[in-house]
Image (cartoon, coloured by chain):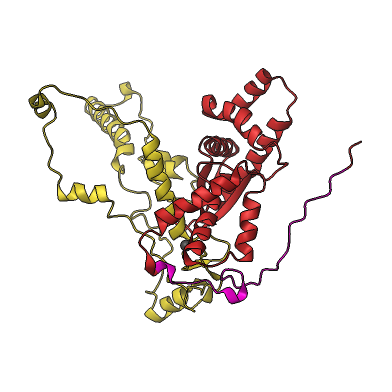
Amino acid sequence: MSFAVRSGAGLISVGQSLLPRLSIPSLSIPLPSFLQPRQKQAEDVEKQEKLRQLAQELPNTRSGIPFFHDNGILLAAPKKKTSHMKRRQRLYAPGSKQIKLKNNLNRCPACGHYKRSHFLCMHCVSEIQQYWKQRDVKLQPEPFKEEFTNPQDEEVLYPGKTERMYERKLRRKEYLVKRPKTLPVEH
Amino acid sequence: MPLGRTAKHLGHTMRNLVSSLIEHESVTTTLPKAKMAQGMIDNMIVKTKKSTLPANALKSKLYGELYNQEKTVPKLMNELTERYKDRNGGFTRILKLEPRIGDNAPQAILELVDNGEREMKFWYIAKTVARLELQGQPLDDLTEKNVRDLLLYRKDGDEEFRRTVELCKKEFFDDSEEELKNLPRMKSNTNGFHRTFRNYKVVPREEKPKE
Ligand SMILES: [Zn+2]
């Protein structure tokens, strides 16, 4: 129904029984000009001109205003504010919405902390992955570095940049949420 | 719609995953995607191994099934078929990880078995063995079985495993006396696992008489 909302002219094409009917100025068929007095003829021309202008402006009059605004149709809305009790009953009472206890805990054989059974220990995984990362960096060829005979050339071409606090924070990735390490298994 | 994707989108996702897996030996994705890609990669390796097509035809067929073809297709045709010539299946494994931070999606590592570069299970067990050796404990039955399974088809597996264990000792347990204090609960003889692990041996299957 979005096409109905967009323009007033489009409205008329929508089922007329559903929506309020817009009253359109009905034009009576004018008498032939030779039967009318001259002044009347001039008035008629003026009137018709005005009506034509109005008809042209009709699509633009309600543009920007949503169709359901202030047209006599009421939409469904809650009658009363939900009370504190009812809201908390709905959100927090069901057992399925509460945090469940994890009973499938094991001891990670590689670090001795708790881990879920059938899952890898994320601490050990990240340790191994970090090692791989720095191992693979060493295998990469060294990045190209420009060499200058005159050190002043380098200073002119690439003046030093001061790292701001904000940039340093971004580089250290302090905004990332880190996964905490689980507790060691007690005996 | 599987994985919330249209058939076309799904095809591209899987093709991307499989190509990355062949290129990098290991990918970390969500569990459903890993499960789906696992079937495809296993199928692809089997069909490449058993293919009777001439090399050119097979190559052009694989070009239509993978991405980054300059790297992946020769690797699949030469390196992987050579590596898995003794295996009839099970070329990949899925390791479950904790849910992703942010959207809590279950994650998994999908990796090619017996790869030399990034095999998480290999390193995890190497780390376990390194820890037990540093603590002066004997290997428990479960870890022993894991090591045996891991090195069953691996070429020069024992040497590589020893090397990795020594590396793990150096890298992960260098100055951490505190960490080594936590000994396994050997009374259950399963390195601290609650369920009792039965001692059993892996008996190789009887070979069928050749006709
Ligand atoms: Zn661990």
Quarter-of-image position of residue A146: top left
Total numbered labels placed on residues in the image: 0
Chief SS of the magenta region: loop
Q: Is residue A4 left or right of residue A116?
A: left
Camera-side residue: B124 or A15?
B124
Looking at the image, residue B178 lies above or below residue B21: below
Looking at the image, residue A61 lies above or below residue A30: below
Camera-side residue: B195 or B182?
B182
Looking at the image, residue B15 lies above or below residue B138: above
* Chain B: drawing colour: red
Residue at image location 65% in from the left, 59% down from the top? B145
Residue at image location 45% in from the left, 79% down from the top? A89
Q: Which chain: yellow? A: A
Q: Is residue A124 left or right of residue B203?
A: left
Q: Specify whether residue B201 is painted magenta.
A: yes
**Residue most extreme to the front:** B136
Quarter-of-image position of residue B42: top right
Residue at image location 45% in from the left, 51% down from the top? B167
Residue at image location 53% in from the left, 50% down from the top? B162
Residue A2 percent coordinates (x, y): 43, 44
Residue B190 percent coordinates (x, y): 61, 69
Q: Which residues are magenta?
A: B179-208
Camera-side residue: B122 or B4?
B122
**Residue most extreme to the bottom:** A85
The quadrant the C terminus of chain B occupies is top right
Q: Specify whether residue A29 is painted magenta.
A: no
Residue B90 percent coordinates (x, y): 67, 45
